[in-house]
Each structure stands twice: as C-alpha cells, then as structure tokens.
Image (spheres, rainbow, N blue to C red):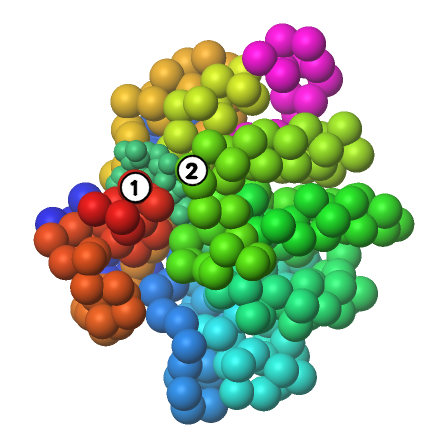
C-alpha cells in the first residue's frame, strides 16, 4: 500500500522516481520522512541525509527543491539548534540555486515556525519558503504580515493536516476551502509566489478561474500534490498549462510515522498510509 504514496526507502529510489516524473513534465520536491525527533543525533542525521540528497541532485543535474519539517530538525527540542541546522542546509541549497520549504506543523508551533522562517530568510533569502494552513483562523493575518515584508515571498498554502480546536481553527470543510481561496488570492495579489498544495478540485477550479482574469499570476504559482494522490486531476491540471509539483516522500521512517498517526487518531486505521497527509473527510471517516 505504501508503494503508491512513497517513492522508496532510499534517496536513490526517490531520485529514480523523480527523474521519471520530471520526464513527464512535473516539478518535484523531496521529503525525508520523520518528525518530532527526540534525540539530537536524529536531527543531525536528518540534516546529513538532506545534505547527501543535495549532492546527489547536483550530480544528477536535477532541480533542487527540498521540504523539511521543523520538528525533524530538532526545533522542538532546542529552537536555536533546530534553526541552525535548517540554516546550514538552506545556505547550501541557496548556493546551489535550489529551494528549501520550511513546513508547518501543529498550531502550537506556528509562532516559532514563522519566527524561524524570518531567521532563515536573513541568511538564505528567497531560497527559503514557508507554509500557511487555511484551517487556522489566524492565517489571513499571517499572510498579510508576510506580504508586508521586504523580501520576495514564496508560500505553500495547504488546508492543514492537524486536528485543531474550533477556537483557533475552522472546522467546516466549506469554511476551510473558502478561507483557502481568499488567502490564495491575497497572496497572489500581494506579489507572492504561491504553491497551491491541494487535491481539492474546487480549489484548483478557483485557481484556473483566477488565472483567466489574471494570466500574469501564472509565473507566480504552481499546484502541488502528494505522490499517488488524485493522479487524474494532477494530469488534467498540468495539461491545462498550470505547473504541477509532486511531493515525493521517502525514507525508512514510514512505519513509525504511520503508527504514530494511527495512535493519535485511531479513525485513520484502515487508511494506513493515506493518513500521512490525510484529508479531513478521511479523518472524519
Ligand atoms: C504538497 C503538499 C504539502 C503539504 N504540506 C503540509 C504541511 O507542511 N503542513 C500541513 O499541515 N499539511 C500539509 N499538507 C497536507 C494538507 O494540509 C492537507 O491535509 C491535504 O493536502 C488534504 O487536503 P486537500 O487540500 O487535498 O483537500 P481534501 O478536501 O482533504 O482532499 C480533496 C480530495 O483529495 C483526496 N485526498 C486528499 N488527501 C489524500 C490522501 N492523503 N490520500 C488519498 N486521497 C487524498 C480525497 O479524494 C479528497 O476527497 C500538504 C499537502 C500537499 C499536497
């Protein structure tokens, strides 16, 4: 089951799959599985693996686009040390003309993650981008603050995969989608590059309509989708002329990752690996 959603356990398997997808016209981003590390050595290993991946991508002359989770780099254990690891990677990625996505995790980490993003931009500049989650009520304001900054902004917009309380997060799928579309428009109007990360046909339709009235946005957006999910929509989107980036997770940590998710939310049982970045409908199943 995992084979559909995972590009492999090793980076060479991930690179092989990336080459094939790239030949079919897709952009790629690589994600080493793992999060919430509890030992410094695990965070160091994550950094070392990403550095090795960077070297392999350079050798293969492939685009360098990496996604990292703050907690995987140890930000939860020691904020400064976590940011320093990310900064080190970000600097090397920037030197290689690549891009590093600093992902977003659960709501209690949003402030420190955005603070970390601002720190990373001091040294890595536009080679680093962040993630905003439309389910959070604060996101519209966060987007406005980020747009107001001086540097060019690159945001991946997602609905958000974590279960959050109603005080801080929209619960209704329609409200989450509405907020998504509004924030997407705000970000594009504000000059940001937007990674429209979704498998929701309604959002992709909204993007396509927006591009009809604002064709100039096309060079500042792309759709992003997880490997193995909604492949028909992925193909249709690309054929419609919108660039699509596929998110390629790889690594050995998938068992622990899936089991942890299942422990957190037993309703995900039966969905197994799909629960990795599972949609709300699925969480409610
Ligand atoms: C490239 C990318 C990066 C992401 N990064 C983050 C991040 O940094 N932080 C974060 O909180 N979240 C992240 N997410 C997850 C995101 O927040 C959502 O949980 C997830 O994308 C599902 O929302 P959706 O917009 O696809 O809409 P949904 O309404 O949830 O899904 C639309 C339809 O797509 C299908 N679908 C959606 N997800 C899956 C799945 N996993 N398996 C099978 N079918 C599925 C279903 O058919 C569903 O009906 C990321 C998602 C993507 C695509």
The answer to whether residue 2 is seen in the rendering is: no
Toward the viewer: 125 or 285?
285
Furthest residue in direction top, as rendered: 212
**CA–CA distance in space, label 2 to label 1:** 8 Å
Q: Is mark 1 within 8 Å of ligand 1?
A: yes
Question: Which image quadrant for residue 96?
Answer: bottom right
> Which mark, by number, is residue 173?
2
Q: Are marks 2 and 1 in contact (CB under 8 Å)?
A: yes
Is residue 81 positioned above or below 223 on the image?
below
Q: Which numbered disc covers residue 219? A: none
**Residue 163 lies in quadrant:** bottom left
Q: Residues within 10 Å of mark 1 (few under 14, many from 20)?
A: few
Residue visible at 72% across and 33% down in the picture: 186
Q: Earlier in the sequence, mark 2 or mark 1?
A: 2
Q: Which residues are magenta?
A: 209-223
Which element carries disc 2, helix, strand or loop? helix
User: Residue 244, image x and y in percent?
Assistant: 46, 30
Whether disc 2's CB lies below 8 Å from ligand 1 is answered yes
The residue at which mark 1 appears reads as 281
Magenta region's main secondary structure? helix
Please name the residue shown 41% across and 53% down the image. Answer: 161
In terms of image quarters, where does ligand 1 lie?
top left
Residue 217 among magenta residues: yes
């Amino acid at each position: 089951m995992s084979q559909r959603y995972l590009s492999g356990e090793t980076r060479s398997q991930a690179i092989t799959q990336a080459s094939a997808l790239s030949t079919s016209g897709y952009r790629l981003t690589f994600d080493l599985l793992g999060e919430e590390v509890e030992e410094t050595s695990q965070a160091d290993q994550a950094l070392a693996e990403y550095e090795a991946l960077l070297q392999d991508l350079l050798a293969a002359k492939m685009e360098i686009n990496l996604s990292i989770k703050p907690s995987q780099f140890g930000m939860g254990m020691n904020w400064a040390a976590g940011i320093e690891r990310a900064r080190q990677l970000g600097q090397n990625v920037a030197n290689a003309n690549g891009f590093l996505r600093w992902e977003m995790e659960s709501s209690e980490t949003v402030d420190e993650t955005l603070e970390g993003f601002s720190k990373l931009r001091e040294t890595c500049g536009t080679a680093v981008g962040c993630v905003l989650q439309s389910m959070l009520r604060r996101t519209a304001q966060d987007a406005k603050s980020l747009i107001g900054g001086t540097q060019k902004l690159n945001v991946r917009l997602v609905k958000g995969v974590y279960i959050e309380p109603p005080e801080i997060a929209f619960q209704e799928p329609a409200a989450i989608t509405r907020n998504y579309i509004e924030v997407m428009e705000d970000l594009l109007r504000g000059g940001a590059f937007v990674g429209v990360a979704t498998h929701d046909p309604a959002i992709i339709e909204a993007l396509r309509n927006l591009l009809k009235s604002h064709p100039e946005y096309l060079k500042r957006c792309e759709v992003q989708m997880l490997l193995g999910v909604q492949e028909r929509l992925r193909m249709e989107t690309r054929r419609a002329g919108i660039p699509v980036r596929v998110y390629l997770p790889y690594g050995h940590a998938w068992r622990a990752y899936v089991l942890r998710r299942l422990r957190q939310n037993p309703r995900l049982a039966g969905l197994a690996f799909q629960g990795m970045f599972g949609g709300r409908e699925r969480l409610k199943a």
